Amino acid sequence: MNILITGTSGYIGGMLADQYTKRDDVSQIICIDKDPLPQWLAGNPKIIAIQANLAIDNWQDEVNKTNITIDSVVHCAWQIRDWYGGRETVRMWNLQGSASVFQWVLDNPSATRLVYFSSIAQFGADKKNSESVLFTTDSETRMTGYCYADDKYEVDYLLRDMLQDNNRVQVTVIKPSTVTGPRGRIGVGKFSLAAALSADANKSAIPWPVQWMLRFMPVIGRWTRQFVHEDDIADVVTLGLFTQTPQQFGTYIVSPNDIIDGKEMANLTGKIAIYIPPRLAQIGFGFVWHLTRGRIPTAPGVWKFMAYPICVDGSLVTTELGHTYSYSSKQAISELRGRYTPSVKK
């Protein structure tokens, strides 16, 4: 099998590329990202790297020049953070970049598998949400006012319009909760929510003002989280790529069902819990966004996702795909166990 993976300079895309190079049934992996291939993947004989922006560069010709017949595609590439004053550019990169990948899959008959990373964020963080009533794949999604969630919402509809009725490509849409694990918390040199909350995070990737603030655990409103371990994510992607799934176009929430609230999170990470009213958080996030010109990621709308729950039911991957979660939310965020434990402890 030959695989094309987008977003390989990022956390999940790079992890998947690394793991699939170790499989005997994978011959070549084309890695595409607007940033250079990470050093830890460079020199791998199974990897061919293409540095290109999916939305504006002619990456398709570069793929064709390799003369590799692609069987499967994993689309992870995403501009997650909004730029200060750059909302339309970020939206264009995400929507047009995704459209170009989906169209390439349609145009290439050899490609019979597509795995796309969506998000649970498009269910919307709202004060009416309940910790006891879980969102499922049948629940309604919506525009939320938060750039990341809204771009995912639009691309989900784009994907359905382009590929839902096709009879050739098996499409697996993955909607994970917050992904974490040894590599995500320590091994990746990028700032992320899971890394910031973790007690053993790679602090070099976190801006120093945030490091100071993260001695405390801000508990805004009804803060809750679910975490899914990076190994579980990799295993579910593998099912989408290497097996015949029950649905030709299947959507799966990937998350263990246990939920962590703010008080428990503070205890797990050894931080001091500070309780903040949602209205105060909204004002504070807006002030910091403008003060730092977006360097601290408090984009418009993100405060809601720190204040109100989006609790999800991830059991469909078990009942339909046969995947049993190896780690609970609590284990994923608090323990350094997993495939990347040896490398991050060096």
Image (cartoon, rainbow, N blue to C red):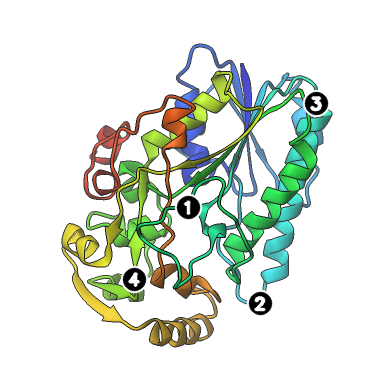
Question: Which callout, 1 or 2, points to the residue nearer the camera?
Answer: 1
Relative to 56, residue 103 above or below: above
Q: Quadrant of the C terminus?
A: top left
| CA separation in Å, label 1 and label 2 | 33 Å
| CA separation in Å, label 2 and label 4 | 30 Å
* Chain-order first, disc 1 or disc 3: 3
Q: Amino acid at mark 4?
A: Arg
Whole-percent x, y for residue 160 in the image:
73, 43
Q: Which residue is mark 3?
A: 108
- Secondary structure found at label 2: loop
* Chain-order first, disc 1 or disc 4: 1
- Secondary structure found at label 1: loop
Question: Which callout, 3 or 4, points to the residue nearer the camera?
Answer: 4
Whole-percent x, y for residue 144 in the image:
59, 68
Relative to 17, residue 121 above or below: below
Q: Amino acid at mark 3?
A: Asn
**Residue at the spot 41% in from the left edge and 30% down from the top edge:** 318
Q: Using the image, tell me which numbered label, if any, was put on residue 91.
A: none
**Residue at the spot 62% in from the left edge and 27% down from the top edge:** 247
Q: Which residue is mark 2?
A: 85
Q: Amino acid at mark 1?
A: Phe
